[in-house]
Image: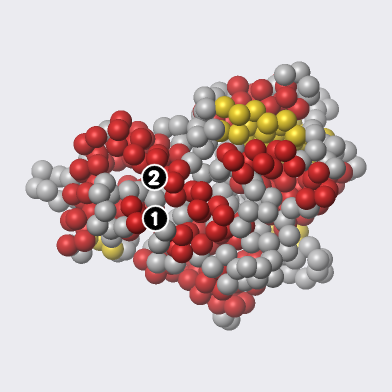
């Protein structure tokens, strides 16, 4: 813990289904953080909305992201573990055993989307702040949550800051993945341009995996398609280096995959700590019919350059495939429920276009021009449709700019929202 921070842990009891407040409940955890020197002052609240889905909020420490130190200059920060993550009644593979059928589990998981998270946030705000509105900082998926918040409860918001997370308001999962594959392809080719030997190394590893039964430390088989998912890291500022140095120690002196490499691959592709990322990924785009229907898998057929035999061997990005729920130990308990979620056609609307058009809450959004995960074109279209929105387009930072910039991105967003920039 950074000694400059004072923290208070909060636990809130919330309904599983906010439309049925007397039904089953969940525990939602949030950590209050304030500059120790200002702990006794009345400061405005800033709610941090973590990216994901399925990711817990950061834990404050000496190595905390720079945005936190920037925020604490002026605010009291609330780090929310969104329902199902971290210390908020976590959803894990063991959770499936509590349900009599995949259908019952799917119905439960349907209550973990943005609409429910926003309802949790409003309940928490009223308990902490009464009628006073607060500000929000949404990173990536946290920006999706922000637009839902502005659609459903703008009275709870004084100002909103979004980094790399303006969703297409009416974009379907098919729209999203049709745009995603070309961006991932260009990012992988950029990676190979920086590290030319890694293209040959990945092809060698893929061929070895196709011909040999190679097991990860947890017993899962490592296949070429799972190897491809290492590309998920490439959209971050240090993503090229993360993948390069992982591959650097991939092969031992006898031409076999090293234990170090296999253990690292298990960790970065296993979803052990965040299964909801995979389970809920496509449901982010569900708003009634049509069903999302494993859109990333269907779109793959339109991009033959990602086929197993194609050269170069292209990695994939933020795509979730049905095979993952067969091949990956942490996801197998979710297989039946995930398939039912993919077929669902009764998702509620997440964004109110009329309400957003009339929005008066200051919204400042960083749109990363080269973002691999969130399409800049869709983000800018949304910025034009939302009242009181000021968009800052930059290629100085990648998707993790809010953390990598040492507080500069957040400072810029605060200035934009306040009319100072």
Secondary element under disc 2, as helix, strand or loop, is: helix
Please provide percent x and percent y for residue 270: 40, 56
Left or right side of 168 for 198: left
Which residue is pictured at 25% across the width and 61% down the height? 215
Q: Is residue 22 above or below residue 384?
A: below
Which residue is pictured at 22% across the width and 49% down the height? 203
The residue tagged 1 is 303
Which residue is pictured at 18% across the width and 45% down the height? 251
The residue tagged 2 is 185
Q: Is residue 139 visible?
A: no
Distance in Å between CA atoms under marks 2 and 1: 10 Å
Left or right side of 405 for 358: right
Which residue is pictured at 24% across the width and 34% down the height? 196
Closer to the chain start, of discs 2 and 1, is 2
Please provide percent x and percent y for residue 268: 39, 49
| Camera-nearest label, 2 or 1 | 1
Classify 10 Å Cα crowding around label 2: few (below 14), some (14-19), many (20 and above): many
Q: Are marks 2 and 1 in contact (CB under 8 Å)?
A: yes
- On-image quarter of the N terminus: top right
- On-image quarter of the C terminus: top right
Which is more toward the observer, 82 or 229? Answer: 229
């Amino acid at each position: 813990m950074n000694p400059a921070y004072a923290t208070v842990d909060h636990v809130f009891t919330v309904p599983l289904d906010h439309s049925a407040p007397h039904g089953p409940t969940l525990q939602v955890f949030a950590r209050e953080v304030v500059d120790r020197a200002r702990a006794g002052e009345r400061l405005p609240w800033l709610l941090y909305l973590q990216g994901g889905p399925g990711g817990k909020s950061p834990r404050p420490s000496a190595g905390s992201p720079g945005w936190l130190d920037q925020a604490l200059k002026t605010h009291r920060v609330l780090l929310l573990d969104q329902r199902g993550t971290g210390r908020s009644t976590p959803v894990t593979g063991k959770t499936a055993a509590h349900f009599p059928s995949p259908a019952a589990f799917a119905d439960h998981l349907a209550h973990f989307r943005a609409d429910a998270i926003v309802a949790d946030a409003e309940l928490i705000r009223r308990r902490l702040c009464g009628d006073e509105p607060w500000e929000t900082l949404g990173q990536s998926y946290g920006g999706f949550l922000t637009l839902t918040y502005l659609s459903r409860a703008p009275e709870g918001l004084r100002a909103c800051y979004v980094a790399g997370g303006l969703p297409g308001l009416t974009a379907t999962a098919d729209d999203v993945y049709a745009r995603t594959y070309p961006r991932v392809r260009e990012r992988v080719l950029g990676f190979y341009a920086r590290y030319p030997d890694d293209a040959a190394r990945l092809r060698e590893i893929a061929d070895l995996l196709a011909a040999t039964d190679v097991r990860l430390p947890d017993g899962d088989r490592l296949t070429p398609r799972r190897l491809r998912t290492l590309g998920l890291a490439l959209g971050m500022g240090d993503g090229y280096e993360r993948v390069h140095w992982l591959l650097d120690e991939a092969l031992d002196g006898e031409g076999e995959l090293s234990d170090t490499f296999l253990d690292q691959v298990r960790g970065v592709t296993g979803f052990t700590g965040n299964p909801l990322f995979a389970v809920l990924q496509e449901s982010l785009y569900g708003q009634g019919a049509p069903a999302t229907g494993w859109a990333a898998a269907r779109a793959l057929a339109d991009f033959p350059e990602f086929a197993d035999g194609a050269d170069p061997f292209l990695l994939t990005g933020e795509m979730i495939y049905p095979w993952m729920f067969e091949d990956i130990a942490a996801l197998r308990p979710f297989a039946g429920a995930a398939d039912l979620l993919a077929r669902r056609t009764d998702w509620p609307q997440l964004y109110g276009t009329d309400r957003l058009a009339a929005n008066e809450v200051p919204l400042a959004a960083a749109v990363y021009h080269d973002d691999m995960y969130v399409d800049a074109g869709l983000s800018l279209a949304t910025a034009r449709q939302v009242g009181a929105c000021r968009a800052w387009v930059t290629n100085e930072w990648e998707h993790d700019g809010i953390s990598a910039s040492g507080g500069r991105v957040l400072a810029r967003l605060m200035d934009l929202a306040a009319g100072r920039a």
